[in-house]
Image (cartoon, grey):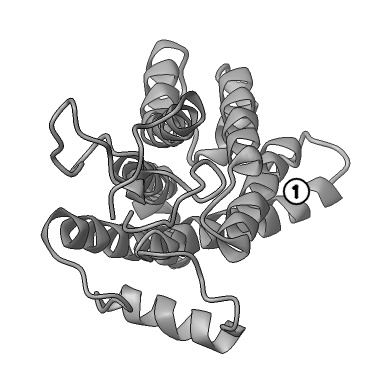
Amino acid sequence: MWSRKPSTLDTSYLNLRLCIGVLGIALPFILRIGSAIFPPDPYSVSAYYYSAMRNILVASLCVLGIFLLTYQGYDKLDSRITNVCGAATIGVALFPTSNPGFKPTWVGHVHPVMAGIALAGQALMALQFTQSAPRDEAARWPDDVKRMLHALIFRYAQRVHGKKLTRNRIYSAAAWLIIIGVVLALVQNLWSDSVKAETQWLFWFESLSIASFGVAWLVKGGTLFKDNAAPDQPVPTEAIPTQASPVDATTS
């Protein structure tokens, strides 16, 4: 379905998605470049809190969290997942990872909980992006779980084709990469110290998840694989959440 031309509010939603995507992709690289200038290289993204890049890490996570908290999706479920992920992302910044020199020690135990919620939310958001219309109000949580599991194996509730199908596959792949990054980050704890000392594996596994999350948002915002439309044509409502556009939502 085609709608009116995008308003300023519509454009702001697209710009918000662009900012989230760029920040997600750029953060690991910014941290790594910073540690190259101000060594050493911390072993994880969270460990940059105890480096010269602390302010960059905390500011980036807080900005990303605020973006996610203020974002309104297609429906209540979409918004709740995004907002919870945003709150957890801010929590990651405010409750740093454990360090012998940091007090109180209980803060370090809160950090992995916040990180786990944030990463789980990122994967769920990518799967939510595959929906082509607002959630049916009559749907229950088992229906949502089923739909997301189907999306995880590249099966979608609505029949889609063309670039929308390509975007859905990217969303599903992004969810898988986020999950793989988390699993590898957990598995590396079992590796010997000599293996972990060669490369900051945890940093790269975390970066895989974060960057995949960013790519999903760039695609969602129409920066990548956007539907073709002539300059004088209206745009598909797929790019705009229902709160920004009063017309019926379609693909996104």
Quarter of the rendering occupied by the N terminus: bottom left
Q: In this image, 100 relative to 112: left or right?
A: right
Q: Nearer the viewer, residue 123 or 70?
A: 70
Q: Nearer the viewer, residue 62 or 216?
A: 216
Q: Residues within 10 Å of mark 1 (few under 14, many from 20)?
A: some
Q: Which residue is mark 1?
A: 108
Residue found 59% across the figure and 54% down from its top = 118
Quarter of the rendering occupied by the C terminus: bottom left
Q: In this image, 242 relative to 147: left or right?
A: right
Locate residue 129, reporting x and y percent: 39, 58
- Quick check: can you spot residue 197? no
Locate residue 154, reporting x and y percent: 24, 74
Q: Quadrant of residue 97?
A: top right
* Residue 148 drawn above or below residue 57: below
Q: Secondary structure at mark 1?
A: helix
> Looking at this rendering, what residue extends furthest in the right direction?
104
Q: In this image, 164 relative to 130: left or right?
A: left
Q: Quadrant of residue 3?
A: top left
Q: Nearer the viewer, residue 159 or 112?
A: 159
Residue found 13% across the figure and 40% down from its top = 228
- Quick check: can you spot residue 244? yes
* Residue 204 drawn above or below residue 101: below
Total marks placed: 1
> Looking at this rendering, what residue extends furthest in the top direction?
37
Residue found 30% across the figure and 65% down from its top = 172
Locate residue 169, reporting x and y percent: 22, 63
Locate residue 98, reporting x and y percent: 71, 45
Kindly identify the amino acid type of the residue bearing the numbered disc 1. Gly
Residue found 44% across the figure and 63% down from its top = 128
